Image: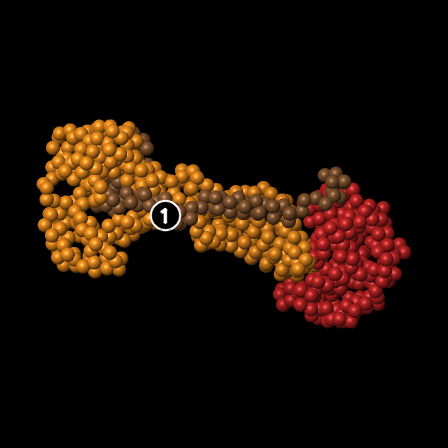
Chain colours: A orange, B brown, C red
Amino acid sequence: MRAWIERQRGLVDYAVASLRRRRGRNLGLFLAYTLLVFLLASVVLYGDALRREARALLADAPELVVQRLNAGRQDLVPGAWLDKLQGMRGVRGLEGRLWGYYYDPAIAANLTFQVPLEAPPPPGQVGIGAALARARGLEPGDVFSLRTYAGQPYAFTVARILSPASDLASADLLLLHAADYRAFFGLPADVYTDLALRVGNEREVRKVAEKVLERLPGARVIARDEMRRTYEAAFNWRQGLLLTLLSTVLVAFALLAWDKASGLSAEERREIGILKALGWDTGDVLRMKLWEGALVSLGAFLAGYSLAWMHVFHADAPLFTAVLKGWSVLYPAFSLRPQVDLAQLAALAFLSVLPYVAATLVPVWRAATLDPDEVMRG
Amino acid sequence: MSDEKAKRPGLRGSTLASGYLGLLSTCLASLLYFSHVPPHQAEAERAHARAQVAAAGLTDLALFNEARYARNGALADPHAAFQDHPMALEHFPAGSLMPPPARARLD
Amino acid sequence: MIELHQVSKVFNPGQGNEYTAIHDVSLAIEPGRCTALRGPSGSGKTTLLGLIGGLSRPSRGRVRLDGRDISALPERFLTELRRLRFGFVFQQFQLIRGLSVLENVMLPAIPTGHPYRQVRARALGLLEDLGLGHRAATETQWLSGGEAQRVAIARALINDPPVILADEPTAHLDSGLSRQILAVLADLGAQGRTVILSSHDPLVFEVRLVERVIDIRDGALLP
């Protein structure tokens, strides 16, 4: 065992000396490699954290949303629909939602008006999202007015500003009382934007959706899972897009690494011949090169992943936010929660370390199996 | 290097290598360890936000609110010529590569 | 005792440039003596030395070391044999550039797994004996020919092998340095090691060192 350790240490000594001798080349490779791992890991870490956050935030959203379509456009839902859906089995809660979009010319941004299902603010008062408060410079107690669709100014008092913790979902939100909502948009008393259904048992969601369609043939039923999948798809393709762009970098690097790692110079071939002639066997030469490759690629992986982690979780990923988060005038300000995913870590390590080591080993193996007497004749 | 220096046992390559890998792994491990939020704690931190989302009855994230297909499928407003914000090319790949114009950005 | 029995070596067999370097050579080399292979360049001295030291395998025939056939040994064992039984001094020195003298000398000891400190002390001792103690930290490309040759000898000795094989040890040296190197080899012989060298340098055969001369020409032994 001791001898084995001494032997490995000796091989590492040689590997380090050999890296040191070509330090320009190896440092360049190390930096390029680190950069690559950094980019890849940043994208993966960011994408995963964003998906995790979205999933967690929407976990308590209504299971089903029922909309009414009119010639392919979403239309207001008559109050009578509420009665038609009364008393369905498996439905825990049924409510008409009132929400809509409002373009605020003052800040050139879209706001989302929403009447909360629970604890709405009193008439005349509103709760607003943090990004909206920032954009309009509002504090609790301030009064501001928006122009209604009828052309009249409509005054609201800011009752509270929503916690930035939920910014991801509430940045552009304006929570108001149902009476204000109807007055502002000029809606009759008995209509809703859509209906929210709460289903007790996750597995009955499909069944309930079918029954809703039986009772209301013109309805469009959207399940929370579909919503979530849409988001995940959006994040996925954004991530995919980045990875696609990165793939050119990846290929370029692979070529570089292949060239640098696999192209044995005459000098290196000669060295391998000398080592073999001096009594190193093929395995020793391979192990030495393995160490050499591992020192470059494992080091680059550790450094790149560390940098990516800091980039994503401590610096809020300045390089990728615009691409990965999405596009809004009122932008949610949020930080992602760091969570260690060992499988993901292992996959990245595997993908970044292994190919490089393999690329270095193949040509060495070919050179190391040659007869050492070339050295005598060389 | 002087003769005397060479005869003293110097820093071995393997010592250097294990120091280098050890330093980097410690760096990564401590980074992960100290900033990792365990799932249950993350859940507790999110609880408030989740409650707010549930109370409002939200089904969407506020990430793409200039792109209707993502946040609010079928709505438009009287000021917009298009359902989407005219500058928001939230279609492959422009929306992902071009930020909003500087004067329209508020954050 | 090293015995060669009807050994032939063919390079590139079956190809257009097939070439027989060694032709049916039988030979016995006694231990503890200094044997020299003499012949003009291209006569097959180097190839024969390689066959004796297990650097290459004969195309036909047998090589025996202390009665044991080594021509059919698996690669691993042959390598181990090379490491522990033979010390090689190559014609072009074959030191590794960019490594220090000390590191070069220690190379053959790495696969043995001997403790680093011991190997290092032994290497420094050998360098000291050869008058190179002050050059231990120098990178080998800055050495003169005579120094490089002595480093190569130190490297050949690091695992304390009973047999030293030296290919044209005086080829790149002037007469003064050649005598120095030959004196070193003579010392090794005096220590009881088997020294086998190849040369066509008359100087080698003038000194007392060589006890037996084997003449070789066109890959065959001359009577």
* Total numbered circles: 1
- Is disc 1 placed on a helix, strand or loop? helix
Q: Residue at x 75, y 71 (%)?
A: C68
- Image coordinates of residue A174 in percent, x first then y, are 23, 37
Label 1 sits on residue: B43
Q: Is residue A322 visible?
A: no
- Say what amino acid the circle numbered 1 marks: Glu
Residue A28 vs residue C18, the one in the foreground: A28
Q: Residue at x 70, y 44 (%)?
A: B10
Residue A271 vs residue C169, the one in the foreground: A271
- Image coordinates of residue A338 in percent, x first then y, are 42, 45
Q: Residue at x 44, y 49 (%)?
A: A340
- Image coordinates of residue A95 in percent, x first then y, are 17, 48
Quadrant, the C terminus of chain C: bottom right
Q: Is residue A131 visible?
A: yes
Quadrant, the N terminus of chain C: bottom right
Identify the subunit bearing mark 1: B
Residue A329 vs residue A24, the one in the foreground: A329
Q: Residue at x 14, y 54 (%)?
A: A85
Image position of B18 (left or right of A143):
right
- Image coordinates of residue A307 in percent, x first then y, are 48, 42
Image position of A278 (left or right of A241):
right
- For label 1, the crowd category at 10 Å Cα-Cα, with few meaning under 14, some 14 to 19 and many 20 or more, is some
